[in-house]
Image (tube, rainbow, N blue to C red):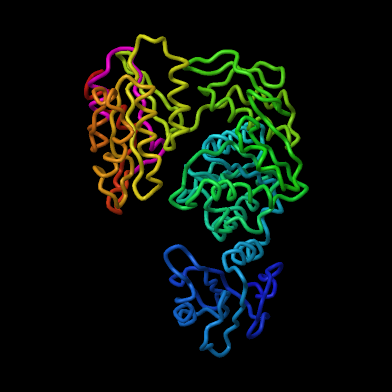
Amino acid sequence: MKLLSEILYKVKLEEVVGTTHAAISGVTFDSRKVKKDALFVATVGENSDGHTFIDKAIESGAIAVICETLPANKHENITYVKVADSSLALGIIACNYFDNPSDKLKLVGITGTNGKTTTATLLFNLFKSLGYSVGLLSTVQNKINNTVIPSTHTTPDALALNELLSNMVEAGCEYAFMEVSSHAIVQNRIAGISFAGGVFSNITHDHLDYHKTFSEYIKAKKKFFDNLPNTAFAAVNRDDKNGMVMLQNTKAEPHTYGLRNVADFKCKIVESHLNGLLLNIDGQEVWVKLIGTFNAYNILAVYLTAVLLKQDKTNVLTALSNLNSVEGRFQYLKSPNGVIGIVDYAHTPDALKNVLETIKDIRSGNEQVITLVGCGGDRDSSKRPVMAAIACEYSNKVILTSDNPRSEDPEDILNQMQKGVSPADVKKTLRISDRKEAIKTALSLSKSGDIILIAGKGHEKYQEIKGVKHPFDDFEILKDTIKTLDI
């Protein structure tokens, strides 16, 4: 139990009706989860307004309410606290309720369109290999050392986030690495969190279904760096044209990294192969098991983060050479007959182009590249024809298929993707909405040495159709189909 006055520390209050000395048993913004003596935070979301559930929350036992508008009819013995922004208040309250766990470890946030998961996961694995107790918050999974906690969002809500961080502190974690999504920044899920550093990977067109314009998307990412304290570092990709924008108003110590432009941390690709990269990082050569230019950026971001966290450079480079690729990120296998299958999470135009350019760089030129690609339903539809066009540009054969259609008709999504297929590319393009059948067809069309890219879902273990999640794992289906077809 905590006093409401303690939980409200640093929250800007506009009006208080009742006492702040009430003992609070828990905090929630979901009226269905209210328990006796709880604090209910009425947040305003895209699809619902928590203010309409205040009476229900009180009936369920809430003794205090945070709201942006005080209700006309107030209950006796209930404390009402009016604030300008309930979601911002919730973030700060969540930190206070869990005793500000982010103050007790070194937390680094990674943001950008592509590379967040790989960078955060590699940092987690790197610091574990260096002997530290570490936490991870990512799209694929959350981890506290060897304990895996399923992940439902790229960045959890403020309460879930602080509870996870609290558990990390309790487990003795010294460091934690987390993906910071643009949605989480705008929705104040990270409000009140103390970061030791922030890393910006890149920004390309994505999530415009939510942010509406690219400039708003950039502003969302920039807000993260604007709010970093002067005790933190801010590291940005100098090769991304919006990288320096992130540093414009930050109070954090600025750093840059890149492969092409002048930067504080530099990397050069010496050799690129299907089984790894030979890199020159700050004058030292290191072999890593990851593939492609995009992973050279990820590795460099990991290296600089470790160095800025005062780790020994030689130890870091040695540990980097032993790290494996992240599940669903350029994850490949070779069939007994020599067909190469690659599963990658590439679900944006830039990510798809990066993966296909990597394949182009490492292929001999005689083999076919067969790309299987789809686009998610209920998401930014403007990228659909663009992704189809990119797949056609870099591939000998293209199969347009379902990703997670969600509530949309898969054929409608494919119709939009088809608009990106030029008349000259129609002959090499197939439409197969059944993703499993599409994988089977790609393998049936292949011969020894050919490269099949299965893009869009990566690590996901499901396919969402009409609100139902069906078991579906691209990599497992690829393996099973290779056995079935004896390829």
Tell me the residue at 63%/66% (across/down): 93
- Whether the magenta-drawn stretch holds residue 458 is answered as yes
Tell me the residue at 51%/38% (across/down): 204
Residue 194, given in percent of the width and then of the height, sits at 69, 53
Q: Nearer the viewer, residue 83 or 349?
A: 349
Quadrant containing the N terminus in the rendered view? bottom right
Q: Nearer the viewer, residue 215 or 474?
A: 215
- Whether the magenta-drawn stretch holds residue 144 is answered as no
Residue 336, located in which quarter of the rendered image?
top left
* Marker count (numbered): 0
Residue 325, given in percent of the width and then of the height, sits at 50, 28
Residue 251 appears left or right of 375: right
Q: Which residue appears farthest toward the front when viewing the image?
A: 423
Residue 486, located in which quarter of the rendered image?
top left
Quadrant containing the C terminus in the rendered view? top left
Q: Is residue 158 above or below residue 22?
A: above
Which residues, given as a range, are shown in magenta?
Answer: 439-462
Residue 133, given in percent of the width and then of the height, sits at 64, 41
Residue 159, located in which quarter of the rendered image?
bottom right
Residue 402 appears left or right of 322: left
Q: Is residue 365 above or below residue 22?
A: above
Tell me the residue at 52%/87% (across/down): 72
Q: Is residue 280 above or below residue 61?
A: above
